[in-house]
Image (spheres, rainbow, N blue to C red):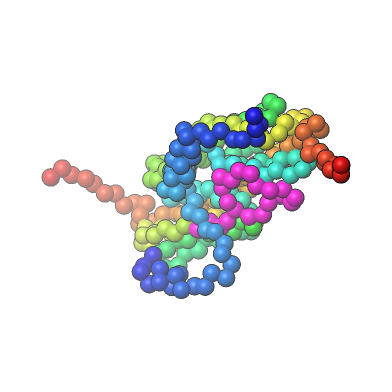
């Protein structure tokens, strides 16, 4: 995120002050792809948005409003309902942007980012100085 | 004696501050204590817990009088995915939470539901624990 983005965000009027949280993620690299898992509890398939803008991959999840179960009051709160958002920077020459896939299951988002053909073959040799 | 006066436990308070700080800095992601909310109504209590990626069959709920324990196991990622770990923030392994409810509940009438990684448990109040209306008489 650039400084300009931060400025724009700051000026956006907070019409609906929904909370936005940063999800925890795991990333693994296989010979064929990068695989990313993100915890987005409370979000179903229709609330997921995965987008690639330039080299920025953004994952967003919209959860149902943080409402109390009807007729009950909160006596203990350790988490709030809200949305999830996190952004990653991809090296575009190393991935196949067309092939990015996303699956949602039990509140966990899995994003598969296939590597570009040249990146699969690339080998980096390390030599001692 | 005032039975309703709560004893302030400084150690509990310190632990709460520590947990809140951990959560603020994102360390809660690797915690074996999934976050819970508790809601109370006249008829029942509702407990919600964030357990993304946990299968219902891997969760054990036990209730004893007014104490509820949620325990289970969260699988370590996707067993099908080989390769090397680049980043690891999500908790995997066994977890357990024990909570004291504000009243006794009827365990056999409790029901649990899992939706989008959030567990929701409805715990009906024991009959003798339901709030009673006390009529105020004039002298």
> In which quadrant is the N terminus of chain A drawn?
bottom left
**Span highlighted in magenta in the image:** A66-85
Q: Is residue A78 magenta?
A: yes
| View extreme (left): residue | A129
Q: Is residue B47 left or right of residue B125?
A: left
| View extreme (top): residue | B64
One can see residue B30 in this view: no
Residue B128 in picture, x, y percent from top left: 80, 31
Closest to the observer, A15 or B2:
B2
Q: Is residue A27 left or right of residue A70?
A: left
Closest to the observer, A92 or A63:
A63
Residue visible at 23% across and 46% down?
Answer: A125
One can see residue A57 in this view: yes
Task: Characterize the magenta stretch by its predominant secondary structure.
Answer: loop
Closest to the observer, B138 or B103:
B138
Residue B56 in picture, x, y percent from top left: 65, 36
A29 is higher (above) or lower (below) than B109: below
Residue A24 in picture, x, y percent from top left: 47, 48
> In which quadrant is the C terminus of chain A drawn?
top left
Residue visible at 39% across and 59% down?
Answer: A90
Residue visible at 57% across and 70% down?
Answer: A15
Residue visible at 64% across and 29% down?
Answer: B1
B2 is higher (above) or lower (below) than A30: above
């Amino acid at each position: 995120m650039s400084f300009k983005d931060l400025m724009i965000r700051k000026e956006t009027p907070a019409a609906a002050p929904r909370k936005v949280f940063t999800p925890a993620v795991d990333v693994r690299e296989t010979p064929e792809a990068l695989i990313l898992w993100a915890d987005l509890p409370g979000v179903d398939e229709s609330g997921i948005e995965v987008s690639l803008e330039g080299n920025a991959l953004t994952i967003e999840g919209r959860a149902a409003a943080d409402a109390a179960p009807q007729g009950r009051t909160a006596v203990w709160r350790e988490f709030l309902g809200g949305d999830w958002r996190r952004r990653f920077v991809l090296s575009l020459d190393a991935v196949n942007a067309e092939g990015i896939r996303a699956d949602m299951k039990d509140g966990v988002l899995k994003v598969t980012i296939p590597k570009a053909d040249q990146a699969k073959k690339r080998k980096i040799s390390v030599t001692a100085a | 004696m005032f039975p309703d006066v709560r004893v302030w436990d400084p150690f509990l308070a310190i632990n709460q501050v520590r947990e809140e700080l951990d959560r603020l800095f994102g360390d809660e992601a690797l915690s074996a204590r999934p976050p819970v909310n508790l809601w109370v109504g006249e008829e029942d209590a509702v407990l919600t817990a964030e357990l993304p990626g946990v299968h219902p069959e891997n969760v054990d709920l036990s209730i004893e009088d007014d104490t509820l324990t949620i325990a289970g196991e969260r699988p370590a990622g996707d067993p099908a995915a080989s390769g090397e770990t680049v980043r690891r923030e999500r908790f995997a392994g066994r977890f357990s939470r024990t909570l004291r409810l504000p009243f006794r509940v009827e365990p056999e009438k409790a029901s649990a539901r899992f939706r989008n990684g959030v567990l929701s448990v409805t715990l009906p109040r024991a009959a003798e624990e339901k709030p009673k209306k006390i009529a105020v008489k004039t002298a």
